[in-house]
Image (spheres, rainbow, N blue to C red):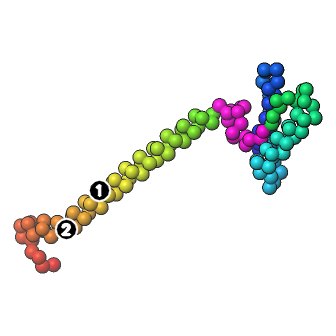
Amino acid sequence: MLVFWEIRCESLGKMFGSASIARLKPGVTVEQARAEVSASARRLAALYPDTNRGVGATVVPVWAGHLGAQGLLLRPLQILMAVCVLLLFVVCANVANLLLARAVWVWISYWTWPVRRREQPGATDEV
């Protein structure tokens, strides 16, 4: 799994950041990687308090990162997916309505057919 590794520093009122992309070893979860990177950032802040004050690090999946095309396209794609799901619900409701109307028509035709057959001139009940 590809992850987005982000380091932020909020010292002297300015925000500096660095980001990189890494591949996790098989079997390692994002939460485990996030805990390890956060622990490393805390150790660095403890060892070098003058330069690493306010430094934090996090790990997120690549699709949830804020940089690149995925960051720009994530919200519009979520909206498009919601519209497609809504359209799918409307289509399913229309198909269900058509099937119900056909079933009602067949039911009405089945129960009224002998009456219509008797009303035709020259029709007999004998088959």
Residue 66 coordinates in the image, percent (x, y):
70, 33
Nearer the observer, 110 or 3: 3
Q: Quadrant of residue 26?
A: bottom right
User: Which residue is painted at 42% across and 51% down in the image?
Assistant: 92
Q: Quadrant of residue 100?
A: bottom left
Q: Residues within 10 Å of mark 1 (few under 14, many from 20)?
A: few
Mark 1 and mark 2 in contact? Answer it, CB < 8 Å: no
Q: Earlier in the sequence, mark 1 or mark 2?
A: 1
Nearer the observer, 53 or 14: 53
Residue 19 coordinates in the image, percent (x, y):
80, 33
**Magenta segment range?**
58-72
User: Which residue is painted at 79% across and 26% down in the image?
Assistant: 10
Q: Is residue 60 left or right of residue 91?
A: right
Task: Confirm whether the magenta stretch covers residue 66.
Answer: yes
Q: Is residue 80 above or below residue 102?
A: above
Judged from this view, the residue extending furthest toward the right is 47
Q: Amino acid at mark 2?
A: Trp
Instruction: Name the residue that disc number 1 marks.
Output: 101
Q: Is residue 18 visible?
A: no
- Residue 111: which numbered mark, if any? 2
Task: Confirm whether the magenta stretch covers residue 81.
Answer: no
Q: Amino acid at mark 1?
A: Ala
User: Which residue is painted at 8% across and 66% down in the image?
Assistant: 119
Q: Is residue 103 above or below residue 41?
A: below
